[in-house]
């Protein structure tokens, strides 16, 4: 049984991962080397739990026990020595991940499953320096931001581990309310990010050709394809529409659409102007400083609403 959880890094993803496991009764040890990040992470988790309370997804009286299940450490060995399942969420650098996998291989018990939340690095390269025995107990477990809300968890099944062990990890993720996706090939971006980039490429291209105003393009996505995507996947939608129709429309449209193999120049031009989105106050839309907190809260509350609704059709 995978019961004792370890998380490395308490940044954007790490703190959400710890929070999600703790919310579902797991005892979580977090190793984060920077003291300031440890302090910020505790405050952030408390804030996010309080929003869950307001949204009636957590009882007020349970907040203290959720927080009590998360322990922060400044020493890796102390934090990880008795863990059953460990996931690293440290910066996306190959050497750093390789060195952590080696340290974890030494420190963790033989039965520990060691996972990476990497968005783009190959598992075989990250784990090249560890023991052959441990290689049968490593995997990618890719969360989506914000991790305490987004249900998806992409779990690798790349041929290095037994189906039995994979199922144990999948059950762990099911027990914290996630929707596990079994990924069979170690391809960059796994499944969800590739789909997202394909949509984003066309959206940025539509903006570039001034086909519609930014708010109308977003509206077309939200109330067109994405409205259906929230309840049915592309393949089910294709079956409902009829594959004959998808074949004809695909032949007619795809040759007209963007097929660039790099990020859209419009995005790069905005980057140069310092228009990075919410964090700089302007991207495609503007975010006045005095309204940013409210805008961010609305964004998160919409996701929580969607999470609640999704429970009606996912169980
Ligand atoms: N941010 C996202 O949207 C997102 C989504 C999915 C996956 N990821 C992946 O998750 C991982 C973490 O990304 P992030 O956005 O949370 O990064 P982040 O920079 O917000 O957090 C990383 C944390 O790791 C800590 N750290 C650095 N060295 C460490 C070490 N040796 N041991 C333990 N902690 C250490 C840092 O102090 C920092 O707090 C990356 O692999 C990233 O690709 C990120």
Image: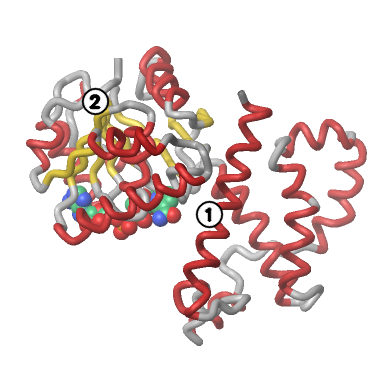
Residue where numbered disc 2 is placed: 4
Task: Establish if 11 lies above or below 171.
Answer: below
- Does residue 112 appear to the left or right of 15 in the view shown? left
Query: Residue 229: x and y, percent?
Result: 71, 42
| Residue at x 28% of width, y 42% of height | 88
The number of callouts visible is 2
| Residue at x 76% of width, y 43% of height | 228
| Residue at x 62% of width, y 48% of height | 195
User: Is the CB of the residue bearing disc 1 within 8 angstroms of ligand 1?
Assistant: no
Task: Establish if 36 lies above or below 248.
Answer: below
Query: Residue 171: x and y, percent?
Result: 43, 19
Q: Would you call the spot at circle 1 few (<14 residues within 10 Å), some (14-19), or many (20 or more)?
A: some
Task: Establish if 145 lies above or below 271.
Answer: above
Which secondary structure, mark 1? Answer: helix
Residue where numbered disc 1 is placed: 300
Depth check, front residue: 186 or 269: 269
Determine which quarter of the picture holds residue 264. bottom right
Q: Looking at the image, can residue 119 be seen?
A: no
Determine which quarter of the picture holds residue 214. bottom right
Which secondary structure, mark 2? Answer: strand
> Which quadrant: the C terminus?
top right
């Amino acid at each position: 049984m995978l019961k004792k959880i370890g998380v490395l890094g308490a940044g954007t993803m790490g703190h959400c991962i710890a929070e999600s496991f703790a919310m579902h009764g797991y005892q979580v040890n977090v190793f984060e080397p920077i003291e300031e990040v440890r302090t910020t992470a505790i405050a952030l988790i408390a804030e996010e739990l309080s929003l869950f309370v307001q949204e009636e997804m957590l009882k007020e009286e349970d907040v203290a026990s959720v927080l009590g299940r998360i322990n922060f450490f400044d020493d890796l060995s102390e934090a990880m020595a008795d863990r059953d399942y460990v996931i690293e969420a440290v910066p996306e650098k190959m050497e750093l991940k390789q060195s952590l996998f080696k340290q974890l291989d030494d420190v963790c018990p033989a039965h520990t499953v060691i996972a990476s939340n990497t968005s783009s690095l190959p598992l075989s390269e990250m784990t090249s320096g560890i023991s052959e025995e441990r290689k049968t107990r490593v995997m990618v477990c890719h969360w989506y931001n914000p991790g305490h809300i987004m249900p998806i968890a992409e779990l690798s099944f790349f041929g290095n581990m037994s189906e039995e062990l994979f199922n144990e990890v999948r059950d762990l993720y099911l027990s914290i309310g996630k929707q596990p996706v079994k990924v069979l090939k170690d391809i960059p971006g796994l499944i969800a990010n590739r789909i997202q980039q394909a949509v984003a490429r066309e959206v940025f291209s539509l903006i570039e050709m001034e086909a519609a105003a930014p708010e109308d393009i977003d509206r077309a996505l939200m109330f067109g394809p994405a409205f259906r995507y929230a309840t049915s996947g592309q393949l089910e939608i294709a079956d409902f529409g009829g594959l004959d129709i998808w074949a004809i429309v695909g032949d007619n449209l795809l040759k007209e659409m963007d097929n660039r193999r790099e990020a859209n120049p419009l995005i790069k031009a905005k980057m140069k102007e310092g228009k990075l989105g919410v964090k700089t106050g302007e991207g495609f839309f503007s975010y006045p400083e005095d309204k940013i907190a409210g805008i961010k809260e609305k964004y998160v509350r919409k996701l929580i609403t969607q999470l609640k609704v999704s429970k009606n059709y996912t169980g």
